[in-house]
Amino acid sequence: MSEREKNLLLIMLGALFIVANVGAYLYVFEPQMNKARSAKLGAERKLEQAEGTLAREEQIQPDKDWLETTGSTVVTPEQAQTKLRGLIKRQADSKGLDTRSLTYIRFEEGAHYTRVRVFHKCTGMEEKMQQFLTAIHKPKQRQVITKLKLKPQANDLERIDCEIEVEQWVITPKQAQQS
């Protein structure tokens, strides 16, 4: 091989080496770097979300503690409304009140709990009505009377017509999974 051929071969091998390195950079190294960058950005976003959730957790922790100490059994809104309606009906019957209507009100789902509501109309003696209202309103058990309308009957001032809306806060299976 002549000196010229050796130089040409070296130049060709050098060019081939440069082309191979550029190709390897463009088709192997750069895609791997982009993949690593996107994974890093995704991890940073997840970290920010986790920190935000942790900050929110500290804000809502007293509410969660309260829900847990009041018997936070996981239940569907429909089951909770049925139980609440049954409880109101039993309490009214045990106090000797006449139930005129007992209807469901659409439940409202929240981020951490769901509000189920029942509307009840009844009639009875004043003392029995007070006992009934006291038995129904139980804030420590997440059950309260949110609307109350009392008016005496025109023909008997000791009998009262009552319209109440009773609300209960429950945790649904979906909300329990989020916690």
Image (tube, rainbow, N blue to C red):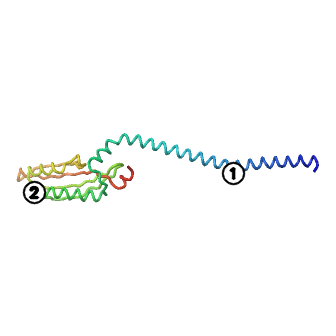
Residue under the image location 32 percent in, 50 percent down: 113
Residue tagged 1: 27
Pinpoint residue 82: horizontal percent, then vertical percent.
24, 59
Residue under the image location 33 percent in, 52 percent down: 109
Residue under the image location 37 percent in, 55 percent down: 174
Sequence-wise, the earlier of marks 2 and 1 is 1
Q: In this view, does 37 lie to the left or right of 134?
A: right
Pinpoint residue 13: horizontal percent, then vertical percent.
83, 49
Compare residues 98 and 176 and report the one nearer the observer.
176
Residues at marks 2 and 1 touching, judged by CB atoms closer than 8 Å: no
Callout 2 amino acid: Gly
Compare residues 118 and 46 and report the one nearer the observer.
46
Q: Which numbered dot is residue 38?
A: none
Q: Is residue 3 left or right of residue 38?
A: right
> How many residues crowd around disc 1 within 10 Å: few (fewer than 14), some, or many (20 or more)?
few
Callout 1 amino acid: Tyr
Q: Which numbered dot is residue 96?
A: 2
Residue under the image location 78 percent in, 46 percent down: 18
Q: In this view, does 30 lie above or below 99?
A: above
Pinpoint residue 151: horizontal percent, then vertical percent.
12, 49
Question: In front: mark 2 or mark 1?
Answer: 1
